[in-house]
Image (spheres, grey):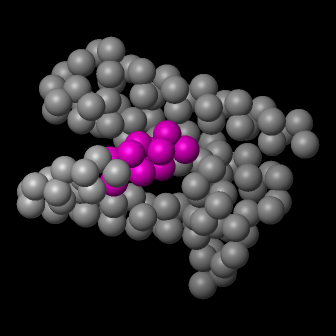
């Protein structure tokens, strides 16, 4: 499968999604069983990954080509926005909170756009 080869963004997307899914399931299990310290650690890891979806795609895809990095960052931003709305909802105690649900997508958008501009400048 050539599209899953090293240096491709599809590989990065698949591995990043797999990591997110694993962390998400683990955090549910930890919360359900009362392991709050471990739950908080996993929640922090999920937060970091969701804010940096594009860079994790590049990292896991082992992407070196500049044009492919830019595509990966743009795809990562598109994936990150709805996930960060959900992250804001979770941080708001699983309730609608415009402040939380706008803050996380705004943060991830700014960080992805900075990464795209810096990569384009290389």
In this picture, which residue range is highlighted in magenta? 42-52
Q: Residue furthest front?
A: 37
Decide whether the magenta segment is chiefly helix, strand or loop.
Answer: helix
Q: Where, by quadrant of the figure, is residue 104 drawn?
A: top left
102 sits left or right of 76 in the view: left
Residue in the image at 31% along x and 30% along y = 88
Q: Nearer the viewer, residue 68 or 89?
A: 89
Residue 43 lies within the magenta run: yes
| Residue 94, x across and y down, in percent | 16, 32
Question: What is the quadrant of the N terminus in the image?
Answer: bottom right
Residue 68 lies within the magenta run: no
**As drawn, 31 above or below 12:** above
Asked if one can make out residue 77 in the rendered structure from this viewpoint, the answer is yes
55 sits left or right of 79 in the view: right
59 sits left or right of 50 in the view: right
Q: Where, by quadrant of the figure, is residue 85 drawn?
A: top left
**As drawn, 44 above or below 30:** above
Residue in the image at 50% along x and 68% along y = 15
Q: Residue furthest bottom?
A: 1
| Residue 35, x across and y down, in percent | 17, 57
Residue in the image at 64% along x and 66% along y = 61
Q: Residue furthest top?
A: 99
Residue in the image at 62% along x and 32% along y = 111
| Residue 50, x across and y down, in percent | 45, 45
Question: What is the quadrant of the C terminus in the image?
Answer: top right
Asked if one can make out residue 82 in the rendered structure from this viewpoint, the answer is no
Q: Nearer the viewer, residue 42 or 55?
A: 42
Q: Nearer the viewer, residue 5 or 59?
A: 59
**As drawn, 40 above or below 56:** above
């Amino acid at each position: 499968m050539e599209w899953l080869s090293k240096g491709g963004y599809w590989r990065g997307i698949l591995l990043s999604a797999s990591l997110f899914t694993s962390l998400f399931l683990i955090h549910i299990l930890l919360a359900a069983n009362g392991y709050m310290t471990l739950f908080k650690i996993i929640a922090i890891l999920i937060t970091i990954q969701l804010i940096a979806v594009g860079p994790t795609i590049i990292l896991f895809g082992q992407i070196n080509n500049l044009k492919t990095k830019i595509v990966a960052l743009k795809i990562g931003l598109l994936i990150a926005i709805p996930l960060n709305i959900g992250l804001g909802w979770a941080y708001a105690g699983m309730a609608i909170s415009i402040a939380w649900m706008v803050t996380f997508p705004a943060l991830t958008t700014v960080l992805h756009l900075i990464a795209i501009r810096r990569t384009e400048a290389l």
